[in-house]
Image: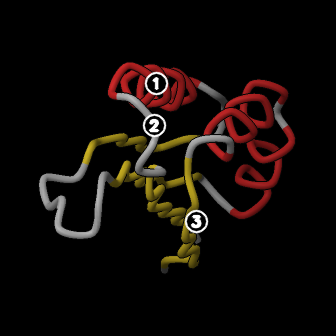
């Protein structure tokens, strides 16, 4: 079974556009890490609730996702993104 990982990052209102662009570039750079089948990072077109970065990923399996979580590039990017946002995560396995 593949593993889906979807994150919505709600950017804090006081964060400037340059930092948002940097966050998007950092997140996009993670798409080459092992175990990723698909990796999409986009700024939501709907801004009614603020600026939202969407991370939509598919991993080969749960084990690949857990290795991704522990990867130094991911942990560093996760911390820098946490500094500018709140987030909601939806993970599930597909058949």
Say which residue label 3 marks: 3
CB atoms of marks 3 and 1 within 8 Å: no
Say which residue label 1 marks: 19
| Quadrant showing the N terminus | bottom right
Residue in front for this viewpoint, 57 or 55:
55
**SS class of the residue under badge 1?**
helix
Q: Residues within 10 Å of mark 1 (few under 14, many from 20)?
A: some
| Residue 12 x, y percent position in the rendering | 48, 51
Question: Taking 91 as reference, is 44 left or right?
Answer: left
How much space separates mark 3 and mark 1, taking CA atoms? 29 Å
Residue in front for this viewpoint, 36 or 26:
26
- Residue 17 lies, with reference to residue 42, above or below; the image says above
Q: State which quadrant residue 52 falls in.
A: bottom left
Say which residue label 2 marks: 15
Point out the residue furthest to the left here.
45
Question: Taking 36 as reference, is 48 left or right?
Answer: left
CB atoms of marks 1 and 2 within 8 Å: yes
What residue is drawn where x is 18% and y is 59%? 47
Q: How is the image coloured?
A: secondary structure
How much space separates mark 1 and mark 2, taking CA atoms? 7 Å
Question: Taking 47 as reference, is 89 left or right?
Answer: right
- Residue 41 lies, with reference to residue 85, above or below; the image says above
Res. 37 mark:
none
- Residue 24 lies, with reference to residue 11, above or below; the image says above
What residue is drawn where x is 50% and y is 61%? 7
| Residue 10 x, y percent position in the rendering | 44, 58
Residue in front for this viewpoint, 6 or 38:
6
What residue is drawn where x is 57% and y is 52%? 59
């Amino acid at each position: 079974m593949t593993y889906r990982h979807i994150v919505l990052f709600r950017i804090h209102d006081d964060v400037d556009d340059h930092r948002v662009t940097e966050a998007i570039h950092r997140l996009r750079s993670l798409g080459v890490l092992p175990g990723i089948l698909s990796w999409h990072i986009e700024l939501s077109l709907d801004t009614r609730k603020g600026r939202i970065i969407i991370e939509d990923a598919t991993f080969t399996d749960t084990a690949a996702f857990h290795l991704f979580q522990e990867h130094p590039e991911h942990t560093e990017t996760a911390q820098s993104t946490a500094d500018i946002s709140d987030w909601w995560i939806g993970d599930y396995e597909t058949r």
